[in-house]
């Protein structure tokens, strides 16, 4: 007879609140093992006893976890067999260092949807049904281990039927902490679903409470309703997101490829930007002048019921006035949204943490994250170099996220937003406090941007008792791309964005670096020009057109340019101030170059949201045009003045603006390929990392990918965090971890 063995096994990773314990119970029971499994503050712990081969088989099966789980490590130590009968699931142990991971909120699963639409099921049309494989997680958790008593569901006492499911390891609702039914769970407040649908179809704007906050909803086919919503939100041009019933409804509006479909239907359910179809019936005010629509599928039972009742696409935009954080607390929402919405579809389940919808698109077959938030956060990323001490990375000023690094894991926060807004700043400070408590981390090192006026930098400098590590903005961008791809470098880094403080005190933004996680050298950059009016130039792109034209034509700007004629009253005044060096800092920014060309071509000379001029220039480019312009490089400087001169000469010669826009994009892609080729020859590097917000531009990114891959480069792009400033905090954390490790 084979002597039994007993192992104590510890599993770390995303293993709480995702059905891992019942998974272990089913596997152990099927193998005839005895023992137990439970949560502790750092993951899942179990003891299994039985024949050696069967115990070994269980340990191996732990590495193939249930759908929402992710296993980082499985460790085992032998124990003396103790005998016993059966395999039990134990309650959680909250003692000890809290290292457990909390799962993101996930979309309603197929099993729950079947129940939602089954008239014979006790949860038929119940807006809050969920199970171990779906539903709220991060937005309701108060602390770890992840148990109902430590979530906002603690206020709802389970009925006997729900309790029976919750305590049965064979049931898919076993220890699904938000488990509920109409008899014991959350209830709708305000309107019911049918009344809300009737109001929406009548043209009303409603506030709808979701997982991470409130949406403002309107019938997307009703121009009056959408334009009213746009006016109330003070959102002049930025497109609204849409929610549609299913993939077929998305296909009726947009061109949906296999990669887009995979994003749309993933458990995260992000908003996916896709080319729109003509004749879809979508109101013009949904996405004025844009060839794209941002579309998402329902991700809560309430959304499914509402879309079923409406049978039309709905605008589902964040519940806020533009530039403010999304409302998520009922009282705050009532105050802030009362002038925006004429009705409420709410509920009485408290949201613990506000989390915006995530946004993504597909470029050249690659998923490109634009905003990483609901559905992805707080899942960690693995750092290429583990952090020897806990690190808080404070992020950038715009599109802010922060990041907490603990050992080999980096926890990038949900999207915070632009920190110049006071309410957003408060959300930032509260978010750092919440996530550090949840992870039980006290940062000893704080990493930050070099710009002293960033609110995030000021926050870092005001922290007491920590070591500070400043990270140059564009180095953080490239480090973010490296970390996103599990690399430590060195690489050729191309960082194209709006602005970031350079080591020489000027505003960088069009940079070719040779970098690894510990440092970088600036090899080539775009030709610097003044930024007339400082930050005002980002909001008034005609100012950047003035600066680039002055440089391109040595002050003798040709007559007949509309951008100059339209600003005849202020052009000379601004030019004089710029020539005198009054509030005209130098910048090598690629983003401001896009602004200049956009204004020059008459696309956009003032913007109502960040990046608008560049986005509309991208949309203008004719995909059939293959021409380009030359951008000579000499002494480490790319002469974009030659590029601007060529653009201007084509414009004055009457060349189609769509062709000029395409040639401009191709010129920058050609420049990237040429400079990277030269740097490969000089440094022997074959990997290129593309980062910075300008690489959200699909035309530029696709062009760079095509040219670099044809030159046999290994091209790294962002896959899990955005290339824009939403990814900077990950880069700061990765740099800090690598520098601390290098110091020993």
Image: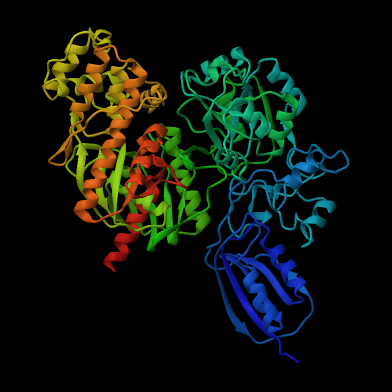
Residue at position x 24%, y 51% in the image: 680
Q: Quadrant location of the N terminus?
A: bottom right
Residue at position x 48%, y 45% in the image: 431
Residue 381 is situated, as x and y percent measured from the top left of the image, at 47, 55
Residue 280 is situated, as x and y percent measured from the top left of the image, at 61, 20
The quadrant where residue 198 appears: top right
Residue at position x 68%, y 58% in the image: 19
Residue 375 is situated, as x and y percent measured from the top left of the image, at 57, 45
Relative depth, front residue between 337 and 115: 115
Residue at position x 64%, y 80% in the image: 7
Is residue 539 visible in the rendered image? The answer is yes
In the figure, is residue 397 to the left or right of 43?
A: left
Residue 27 is situated, as x and y percent measured from the top left of the image, at 72, 69
Q: In this picture, is 669 found above or below 445? A: above
Relative depth, front residue between 710 and 112: 710
Q: Quadrant location of the C terminus?
A: bottom left
In the figure, is residue 591 to the left or right of 552?
A: right
């Amino acid at each position: 007879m084979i002597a039994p063995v007993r192992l104590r096994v510890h599993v770390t990773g995303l293993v709480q609140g995702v059905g891992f314990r019942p998974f272990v119970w089913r596997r152990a029971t099927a193998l005839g093992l005895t023992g137990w499994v439970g949560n502790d503050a750092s993951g899942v712990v179990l003891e299994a006893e039985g024949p050696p081969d069967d115990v070994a088989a269980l340990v191996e099966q732990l590495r193939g976890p249930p759908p929402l789980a992710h296993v980082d490590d499985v460790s085992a130590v032998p124990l003396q067999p103790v005998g016993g009968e059966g395999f039990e699931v134990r309650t959680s142990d909250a003692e000890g260092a809290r290292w457990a991971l909390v799962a993101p909120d996930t979309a309603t699963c197929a099993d729950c949807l079947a129940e939602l639409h089954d008239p014979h099921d006790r949860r038929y049309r119940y807006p809050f049904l969920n199970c171990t494989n779906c539903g709220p997680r991060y937005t309701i958790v108060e602390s770890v281990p992840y148990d109902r008593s430590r979530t906002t569901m603690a206020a709802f006492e389970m009925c006997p039927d729900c309790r029976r499911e919750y305590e049965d390891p064979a049931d898919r609702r076993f220890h699904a902490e938000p488990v509920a039914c109409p008899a014991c769970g959350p209830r709708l407040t305000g309107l019911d679903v049918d009344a809300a649908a009737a109001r929406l179809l009548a043209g009303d704007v409603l506030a709808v409470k979701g997982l991470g906050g409130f949406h403002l909803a309107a019938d997307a086919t009703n121009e009056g309703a959408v334009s009213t919503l746009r006016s109330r939100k003070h959102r002049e041009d930025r497109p609204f997101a849409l929610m549609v019933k299913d993939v077929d409804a998305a296909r009726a509006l947009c061109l949906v490829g296999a990669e887009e479909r995979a994003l749309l239907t993933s458990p995260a359910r992000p908003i996916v930007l896709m080319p729109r179809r003509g004749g879809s019936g979508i109101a013009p005010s949904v996405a004025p002048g844009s060839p794209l629509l941002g579309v998402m599928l329902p991700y809560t039972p309430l959304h499914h019921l509402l879309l079923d009742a409406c049978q039309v696409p709905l605008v589902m935009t964040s519940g806020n006035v533009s530039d403010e954080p999304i409302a998520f607390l009922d009282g705050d929402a009532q105050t802030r949204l009362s002038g925006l919405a004429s009705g409420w579809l709410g509920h009485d389940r408290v949201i613990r943490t506000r989390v915006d919808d995530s946004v993504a698109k597909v470029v050249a077959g690659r998923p490109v994250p634009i905003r990483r938030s609901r559905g992805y956060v707080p899942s960690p990323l693995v750092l290429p170099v583990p952090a020897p001490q806990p690190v808080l990375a404070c992020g950038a000023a715009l599109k802010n996220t922060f990041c907490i690094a603990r050992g080999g894991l980096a926890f990038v926060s949900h999207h915070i937003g632009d920190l110049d807004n006071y309410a957003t700043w408060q959300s930032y400070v509260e978010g750092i406090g919440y996530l550090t408590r949840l992870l039980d981390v006290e940062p000893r090192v704080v990493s930050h941007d070099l710009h002293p006026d960033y609110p995030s930098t000021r926050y870092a400098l005001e922290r007491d008792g920590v070591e500070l590590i400043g990270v140059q903005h564009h180095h953080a961008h490239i480090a973010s791309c490296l970390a996103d791809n599990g690399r430590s470098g060195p690489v050729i880094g191309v960082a194209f964005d709006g602005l970031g403080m350079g080591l020489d005190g000027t505003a960088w933004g069009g940079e070719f670096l040779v970098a690894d996680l510990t440092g970088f050298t600036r090899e080539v950059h775009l030709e610097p020009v003044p930024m007339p009016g400082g930050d005002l130039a980002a909001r008034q792109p005609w100012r950047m057109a003035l600066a680039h034209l002055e440089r391109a034509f040595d002050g003798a700007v040709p007559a007949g340019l509309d951008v100059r004629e339209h600003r005849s009253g202020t052009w000379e005044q601004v030019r004089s101030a710029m020539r005198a060096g009054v509030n005209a800092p130098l910048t090598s920014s690629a983003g401001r170059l896009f602004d200049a060309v956009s204004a020059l071509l008459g696309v956009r000379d003032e913007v109502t949201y960040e990046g608008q001029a560049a986005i509309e220039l991208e949309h203008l480019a004719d995909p059939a045009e293959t021409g380009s312009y030359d951008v000579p490089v000499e002494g480490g400087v790319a002469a974009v003045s030659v590029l601007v001169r060529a653009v201007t000469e084509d414009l004055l010669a009457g060349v189609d603006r769509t062709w000029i826009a395409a040639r401009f994009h191709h010129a920058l892609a050609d420049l990237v390929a040429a400079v990277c080729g030269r740097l490969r020859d000089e440094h022997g590097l074959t990997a290129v990392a593309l980062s910075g917000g300008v690489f959200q531009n699909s035309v530029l990114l696709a062009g760079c990918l095509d040219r670099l891959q044809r030159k046999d480069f290994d091209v790294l792009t962002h896959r899990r965090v955005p290339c824009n400033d939403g990814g900077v905090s990950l880069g700061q954390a990765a740099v800090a971890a690598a520098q601390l490790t290098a110091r020993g």
